Image (cartoon, grey):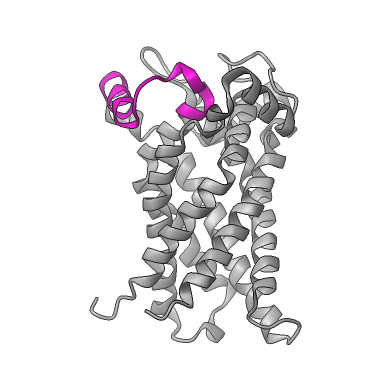
Amino acid sequence: MASLNWKPFIYGGMASIVAEFGTFPIDLTKTRLQVQGQSHCMEVRYRGMFHALLRIGQEEGVKALYSGISPALLRQASYGTIKIGTYNTLKKLFVSRPEDETMVINVFCGVVSGVLSSSLANPTDVLKIRMQAQGSLLQGSMMSNFMNIYQTEGTRGLWRGVIPTAQRAAIVVGVELPVYDITKKHLIGSGVMGDTILTHFVSSFTCGLAGALASNPVDVVRTRMMNQRVLAGSPLYKGTLDGLMQTWRGEGFFALYKGFWPNWLRLGPWNIIFFMTYEQLKKLPL
């Protein structure tokens, strides 16, 4: 452990916070779009991402576009730190040089780091989803809302949706980080581009699109499972597969891609901001 490199942990957390703050309103519209059609959210209030941004701003105020930003930043401070640090540490256990990395190794490291980091950070994700979906209905500070969930729903309430969250993270991290690394490696290795900001931009844009396509169905179910409150009786969705099937049967296949455009338009800019920030932090003379 003496040789553990702390920089990916610190830089990963810092870059994640910057990227989260810059793209948060898009993430909020994605959440609102995804919970539409759920049993207690049957009213279709938003026709798309831009309509949602406009309507939320008009009806709830511009500040509402950042509902849930506190737990979101706390989540990234923990999730982003563990995710990037674990991913890079695991890769070094298999290969000593970046040139020797393979897609299989990178995917495995991405899946493991995604599951571990998302599971540990799940309580902050639950609160973020609730605050985004319910907006002004949730009153009080971040800590008071944490305590309210714990007191009314118990520890399970804070880890509600942890399985689909971990599954989504396994997909997203298992796709995005390897795609970024492999794309960057081939662009530089082929001589098409050097290790420049443009290379980081193209690689991050590509991995954001790949991650959105792979993760959206699980993301829809995860969002709905976290948004449901179970005070008595049984939950609407018993698990990820049940949620996928219920959504498909009740609303059609394309309901699994609700919120795809804001999801991609968030993951794209999020990854661009994240990786460009992360790559610049790596160059600091520390």
Using the rendered view, name the quadrant where residue 94 is placed.
bottom left
Asked whether residue 112 appears in the rendered view, the answer is no
Using the rendered view, name the quadrant where residue 233 is placed.
top left
> So how many labels did they put on this image?
0
Q: Nearer the viewer, residue 168 or 136?
A: 136
Q: Please determine whether, in this image, residue 167 is positioned above or below residue 52.
A: below
- Range shown magenta: 130-153
Residue 200 in the figure: left or right of residue 160: right
Q: Mainly helix, strand or loop, the magenta region?
A: helix
| The N terminus lies in quadrant | bottom left
Q: Please determine whether, in this image, residue 112 is positioned above or below residue 29.
A: below
Direction left: furthest residue: 2
Residue at x 59% of width, y 72% of height: 181
Q: Please determine whether, in this image, residue 195 is positioned above or below residue 63.
A: below
Residue 223 on image: x %, y %: 53, 33
Q: Nearer the viewer, residue 285 or 229?
A: 285
Asked whether residue 23 appears in the rendered view, the answer is yes
Residue at x 69% of width, y 27% of height: 54
Residue 2 on image: x %, y %: 23, 79
Residue 144 in magenta stretch: yes
Residue 107 on image: x %, y %: 54, 65
Residue 122 on image: x %, y %: 39, 41
Residue 182 in magenta stretch: no
| The C terminus lies in quadrant | bottom left
